[in-house]
Image: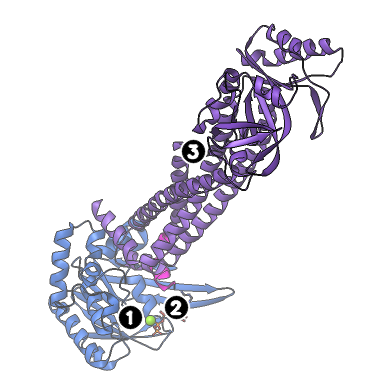
């Protein structure tokens, strides 16, 4: 048996160029499958990971979304906030003011949205998932301090804003006490373009005591839909309107995104299936060619006394060695390609995305390489080994 | 002893039939050196292929040591080719990925001889045909005459009783051809049966007996 390995190995090595091509043919196909599947799984994990961290949230706004535009119908009152607080199943609640103001920084002006709320609760909504890059989060007594999002710091003004820089809003000076990290996709719209104040400071700056946004966290995600309805009812009652408040659970958003994701996943599976077929045909072709062009050699071996089974086992051994190497190379390349693609796509989309390499994908890739490789080597080898020696020797 | 009984081979090419061999009855005694001559297309190669068990007849039979080869299965025929017969082709037909000594050792590989034993014997056989200094050369690094000597060494690898050569000197110059015939003559002196096809009368002169063929028949 060891002898057979030696002979098969010799034959592979002597036909270096052909063997490398065959290995590559197999590896490319397997790499395509492995890379596609790993990127796909990575995407799935990245998105569901982002979503499940926020699944217990309900956002309440005074208005409604028609089509793609949000129509504001007014603002909430302190009574609304107190009524919502009384609903069972709510873990915490944050009332926020929310409005645009003109902000001046080093003689440059820009309109920016200002968000104010209870510092502890606002902090638990945003600081934990996003993180502070510079400085610190707001304290209850920060009447002249503010924290800014990444885009406010870097994009909105010609000069980058750092901690301890001064901003002027409606003639009053404020000091930047902290700068957020760049937020991932799910939080980007909430954090990056905003200025954060304590509730009191924001109400002063915006010269209002209105509440424009209520965020609620529930204990039990399964109750979120019911609680959302209760919230809408309670606030609508206060204002005597039918459709004044809109409470959206993250769950319903996840469902919407989930549908989209199922489509993406279907497309990925489709691409993988195509890659599989293309890979199989490629492997068959290279294997078929490399065995067929050796029909003469098979004839010579038979003429000097090899049994059909000797020839067949030699060629099967050779195909399985080539397929094995092709499969391994394919898996390695596939994993590398998947990591590079995921990294690039993640960076482009601003989310953390890493390829998820599942063992069953690698095993599947190896199985495809071995099964397709060996079978497509087997067929021409058997055909050639069944020819009479004269016929096979004559074959050129 | 080898003999044929009404050995017939018909090739069908579409509607046309080519009678490559017609009822050939030939007897070759053990230890004989026989040369077969005849014009191109007269069936010489076809006859040798049948005797060497490389092909199967349309009708009739080849008997080797009184065994009717028509009754043997694939593996038994392979065993005869491996153990009893050494075949030398006009085109040498070496395995070009293997070097000289590995080519010579290949029939022993299929016979299940241990690696070190078969490489040692293969090297001795190469020394015997005058290629002791070309043991690790690839066929592509050898001249035609040298390749044919490797092929002869390979034919001897399992120590066969019968050596068959189909124009073994056809692709080499006269001098090398004579050297090859000397080797075959030496093998005959050792007691082996030698059957060769040749066009060259000078080479046929080495043989103890010469047979002529025409139109698929062996003439008296
Ligand atoms: N595989 C084949 N298919 C069809 N016809 C064949 C085949 N092999 C041989 N023949 C025919 O059989 C006849 C005998 O051929 P063979 O090769 O035995 O002749 P030969 O005496 O060896 O000739 P040469 O001296 O040219 O080698 C020829 O007419 C040839 O065309
Ligand atoms: Mg011929």
Residue B20's tag is 2
Q: Given the image, what chain letter belongs to the residue carrying mark 3? A: A
Q: Given the image, what chain letter belongs to the residue carrying mark 1? A: B
Chain letter matching colour blue: B
Label 1 crowd bin: few (<14), some (14–19), many (20+), radius 10 Å: some
Query: Judging from the image, what secondary structure is the residue with disc 1 in?
Result: loop
Do the residues at pointers 2 and 1 share their chain?
A: yes
Q: Residue at x 32, y 66 (%)?
A: A14
The residue carrying mark 3 is A356
Q: Given the image, what chain letter belongs to the residue carrying mark 2? A: B
The residue carrying mark 1 is B90
Q: Are marks 1 and 3 in contact (CB under 8 Å)?
A: no
Residue A75's tag is none
Do the residues at pointers 1 and 3 share their chain?
A: no
- What residue range appears in magenta? A385-396
Q: Is mark 2 within 8 Å of ligand 1?
A: yes
Chain letter matching colour purple: A
Residue B147, image x, y percentages: 26, 79
């Amino acid at each position: 048996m060891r002898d057979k390995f030696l002979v098969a190995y010799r034959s592979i090595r002597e036909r270096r160029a052909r063997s490398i091509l065959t290995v590559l043919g197999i590896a490319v196909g397997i790499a395509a499958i492995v890379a596609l599947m790993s990127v796909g799984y990575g995407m799935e994990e990245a998105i569901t990971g982002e979503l499940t961290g926020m699944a217990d949230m309900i956002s309440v706004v005074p208005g409604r979304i028609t089509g793609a535009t949000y129509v504001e119908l007014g603002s909430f009152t302190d009574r609304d906030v107190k009524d919502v607080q009384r609903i069972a199943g709510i873990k915490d609640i944050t009332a926020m003011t929310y409005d645009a103001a003109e902000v001046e920084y080093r003689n440059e002006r820009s309109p920016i949205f200002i968000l104010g709320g209870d510092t502890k609760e606002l902090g638990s909504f945003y600081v934990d998932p996003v993180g502070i890059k510079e400085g610190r989060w707001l304290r209850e007594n920060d009447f002249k301090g503010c924290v800014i999002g990444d885009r406010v710091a870097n994009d909105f003004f010609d000069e980058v804003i750092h901690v301890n820089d001064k901003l002027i809003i409606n003639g009053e000076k404020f000091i930047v006490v902290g700068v957020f990290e760049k937020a991932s996709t799910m939080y980007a719209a909430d954090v990056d373009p905003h200025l954060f104040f304590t509730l009191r400071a924001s109400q002063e700056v915006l010269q209002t005591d209105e509440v424009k946004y209520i965020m609620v966290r529930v204990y039990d995600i399964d109750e979120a839909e019911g609680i959302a309805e209760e919230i809408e009812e309670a606030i609508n009652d206060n204002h005597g309107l039918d459709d004044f408040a809109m409470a959206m659970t993250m769950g319903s958003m996840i469902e919407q995104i989930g549908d989209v994701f199922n489509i993406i996943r279907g497309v990925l599976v489709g691409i993988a299936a195509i890659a599989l077929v293309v890979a199989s045909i490629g492997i068959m072709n290279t294997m078929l060619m490399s065995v067929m062009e050796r029909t003469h050699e098979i004839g010579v071996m038979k003429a000097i006394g090899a049994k059909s089974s000797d020839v067949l086992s030699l060629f099967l051994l050779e195909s399985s060695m080539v397929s094995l190497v092709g499969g391994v190379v394919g898996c390695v390349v596939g994993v590398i390609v998947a990591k590079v693609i995921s990294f690039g796509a993640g960076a482009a989309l601003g989310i953390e995305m890493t390829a998820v390499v599942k063992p069953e994908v690698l095993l599947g890739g190896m199985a495809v390489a071995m099964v397709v490789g060996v079978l497509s080597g087997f067929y021409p080898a058997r055909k050639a080994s069944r020819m009479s020696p004269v016929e096979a020797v004559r074959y050129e | 002893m080898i003999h044929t009984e009404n050995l017939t081979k018909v090739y069908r090419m579409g509607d046309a039939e080519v009678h490559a061999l017609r009822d050939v009855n030939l007897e070759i005694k053990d230890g004989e050196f026989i040369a077969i001559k005849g014009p191109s297309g007269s069936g010489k190669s076809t006859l040798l292929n049948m005797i060497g068990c490389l092909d199967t007849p349309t009708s009739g039979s080849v008997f080797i040591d009184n065994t009717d080869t028509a009754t043997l299965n694939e593996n038994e025929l392979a065993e005869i080719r491996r153990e009893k017969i050494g075949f030398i082709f006009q085109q040498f037909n070496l395995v070009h990925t293997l070097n000289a000594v590995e080519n010579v050792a290949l029939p022993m590989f299929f016979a299940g001889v241990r690696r070190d034993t078969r490489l040692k014997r293969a090297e001795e056989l190469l020394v015997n045909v005058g290629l002791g200094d070309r043991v690790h050369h690839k066929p592509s690094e050898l001249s035609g005459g040298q390749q044919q000597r490797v092929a002869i060494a390979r034919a001897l690898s399992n120590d066969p009783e019968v050596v068959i050569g189909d124009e073994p000197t056809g692709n080499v110059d006269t001098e090398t051809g004579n050297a090859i015939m000397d080797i075959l003559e030496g093998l005959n002196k050792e007691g082996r049966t030698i059957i060769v096809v040749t066009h060259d009368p000078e080479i046929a002169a080495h043989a103890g007996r010469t047979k002529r063929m025409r139109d698929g028949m062996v003439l008296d």
